[in-house]
Image (spheres, grey):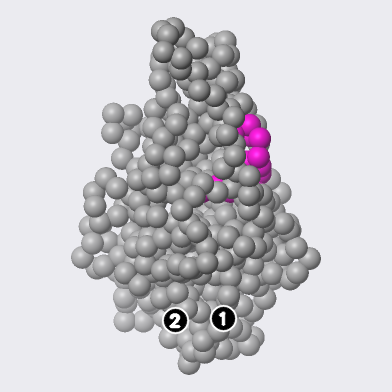
Amino acid sequence: MTRHELPKGMIRATDTTGTHEGYMPGFGNDFETEALPGALPQGMNSPQKCNYGLYGEQLSGTAFTAHPPERTWTYRIRPSVKHSTRYTKIDLPYWKSAPNVDPDVISLGQYRWDPVPQTEEKLTWLTGMRTMTTAGDVNTQVGMAAHVYLVTTSMVDEYFYSADSELLVVPQEGKLRFATELGIIDIEPQEIAIIPRGLVYRVEVLEGPCRGFVCENYGQKFEMPARGPIGANALANPRDFKAPVAAFEDREVPSTLTIKWCGQFHETKIGQSPLDVVAWHGNYAPFKYDLTTYCPVGAILFDHPDPSIFTVLTAPSGVPGTANIDFVLFRERWMVAENTFRPPWYHKNIMSELMGNIYGQYDAKPQGFVPGGMSLHNMMLPHGPDREAFEGASNSNLGPTKLENTMSFMFETRFPQHLTEFAGKEAPLQDDYIDCWDDLEKKFDGTPGLK
Ligand SMILES: [Fe+2]
């Protein structure tokens, strides 16, 4: 991969021990990194005076008493109170938060969308966010929203943070840079980024136009799923998550910081870049993850397990074992099960399933679910293979087969997902999706035998 130049004036740490320049490996590690030598206090968090005249400040992502607590100590040119003045409410009409139930849109249904088309319009990370569904309630920190983003232009002297949510970003086209308080993350399709609640950043276009998907998690943070009998390895491995090394800029220019707070957006005008953290240590950090490092596990003799085997990350809800969100990856893999209907079976599910196609073809739907497209199978609504997939899987010779040219994902939540007005009326909804099961035949005629 080509390396992209750092923003002008930005100074980044060079003393990383990782194998990927600019990143440190591990999920939820206690990291430490400094962009100037000696900037990070040793052996304590809050010395009487910090080196370089920096200010010490803690960013807490969990309650102090959580186990384990997640927090990061930052050493910065100005404390965050200097990056915050009076707030003015602004409107970002396409970025919705739960509860957002539109009485004119029916959310009960099986839905599929073509890709939201790219545009000539100048859209930033903020103005280009298009909410498709919301679930739960942002005010009680329960549930999620699913968005499509269309980004054609970089944020310039503009910064953002969400007090409401952690953002899981899944690019589908184009390359984006997240210049955050804790360092720089560059992502492209087949990678994801996780931006924690409260972290300030700007988003730049490295190669545009950019389109992708975002899961906005209002609830507890994403964590790695318990592997249970799978053991210590496979699925997503912790070392493949990469946190950025420290990077800062000392830039005094009129700037705007936008804050998402309880579903509303507010601006504050400041006189400098807030990306001024020279050193940090802690376990509350942004990450990137390469989806091609995900090690899928599946049936090696018969039957088709639940898709939970493909969970990359899970965000727990208040009820143990029922996720606020599961992020699930359907990537290339071998199919070897004997005497088995190999694609996903027909089902109804208390969880509501929003899928997106990153590239290629999905095995349960050979047609119609295209790269950049999305589908929604809401709570307790039946779905499954279309006729082509059913007949193909029922009649094929069951030798080992490699599913190739495929990468789709699912944001699955225990809460029903409500369509936004954009999803119901503006986005390219496929009116005929529900018809994909029309020509499934009745095979039963009362006589025994395989039909
Ligand atoms: Fe499903």
In this rendering, would 408 be left or right of 51? Answer: right
Please give left or right for residue 124 compared with residue 71 in the image: right
Looking at the rendered structure, the secondary structure element under dot 2 is helix
On the rendered image, what quadrant is the N terminus found in?
top right
Mark 2: is the Cβ under 8 angstroms from ligand 1?
Answer: no
Image x and y of residue 326, in percent? 40, 47
Report which residue position mark 1 lands on.
Answer: 91
Which element carries disc 1, helix, strand or loop?
Answer: loop
Pinpoint residue 92: horizontal percent, then vertical percent.
58, 76
Look at label 2 and name its amino acid.
Ser
Q: Quadrant of residue 32?
A: bottom left
- Bin the neighbour count of mark 1 within 10 Å (Cα to Cα): few under 14, some 14-19, many 20 and up: few
Q: Is 105 situated above or below 139?
A: above
Residue at the disc numbered 2: 80
**Residue 379 percent across, percent down from the top left:** 40, 48
Q: Which residues are magenta?
A: 361-376
Pick the front one: 183 or 440: 440
- Other-residue count near label 2 (Cα within 10 Å), few / some / many at <14 / 14–19 / ≥20: some
Comes first in the chain, label 2 or label 1: 2
Q: Is residue 385 visible?
A: yes
Judged from this view, the residue extending furthest toward the left is 65
Report how far apart the C-alphas of labels 2 and 1 lie in the structure: 24 Å
Q: Nearer the viewer, mark 2 or mark 1?
A: 1
Residue 134 on the magenta span: no
* Vertical arrangement, residue 176 with respect to residue 96, above or below: above
Q: Is residue 243 visible?
A: no
Q: Is residue 428 left or right of residue 271?
A: right
Question: At label 1, which amino acid type do we have?
Answer: Asp
